Image (spheres, rainbow, N blue to C red):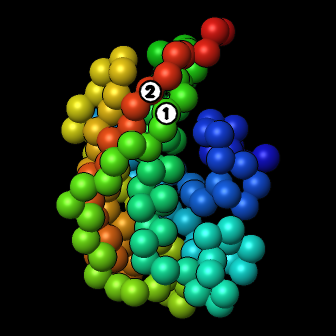
Amino acid sequence: MSALAALIPHQADMCLLERVIEWNDESIHLETTTHRSLQNPLRSGDELHAVHLCEYGAQAMAVHGALQAQARGSTAAPGMLVSLRAVEFHCDRIDDLPGPLHIQAQCLQASAASQQYSFTVSHAGTLLAQGRAAVVLGETPAA
């Protein structure tokens, strides 16, 4: 199990992120090459469409929340993605991109009940997608 999979509910091939580059209380920067994997569960036929970059952004949010909780000595509350807003795509597909994707998420608002983030996904310095996402949080698991 990867270190990131231990932090979030996404397991096996569905854990799309591979490495945290840096993070602080407000934001996180990760990278991955899972967009190239033939085992990527989001693939449709031989392609991975740009719309799936929203999942990469949502997983970055989950990792950020888990790292924040871990730093406080607790466990992150489970979350459910409830909305995507102002999402823009600057490509059609991503499976043919040779290098790693860079995923950044910035916390815009956080409470015990919900979180809102902005996210960007880029490749080789080129913006692929950007948007905002909202998550409703459940009960924090007992320690």
Query: Residue 8: horizontal and vertical position, in percent?
Result: 61, 39
**Residue 142: x, y in percent?**
63, 9
The image shows residue 49, relative to residue 75, as above or below, that is: below
Asked whether the residues under the numbered discs 2 and 1 touch, taking CB atoms below 8 Å apart as contact, a structural biologist would say yes
- The amino acid on which the numbered mark 2 sits, given as a three-letter code, is Leu
| Residues at marks 2 and 1, CA–CA distance in whole angstroms | 4 Å
Q: Is residue 77 above or below residue 106?
A: above
SS at mark 2 in the image:
strand
Q: Is residue 125 visible?
A: no
Query: Residue at coordinates 54% horizontally, 16% vertically from top-left?
Result: 140
User: Is disc 1 surrounded by few (<14), some (14 to 19) or many (20+) residues within 10 Å?
Assistant: many
Q: Label 1: which residue?
A: 79
- Using residue 10 as the reference point, say whether residue 118 is left or right of it: left
Front one among 39 and 68? 39
Residue type of the residue flagged with mark 1: Gly
Say which quarter of the image contains residue 128. Answer: bottom left
Between discs 2 and 1, the one toward the N terminus: 1
Mark 2: few/some/many CA within 10 Å (<14, 14-19, 20+)? some
Q: Which residue is denoted by mark 2 in the rendering? A: 137
Q: Residue at x 65, y 9 (%)?
A: 143
Viewer-side residue, 74 vs 134: 134
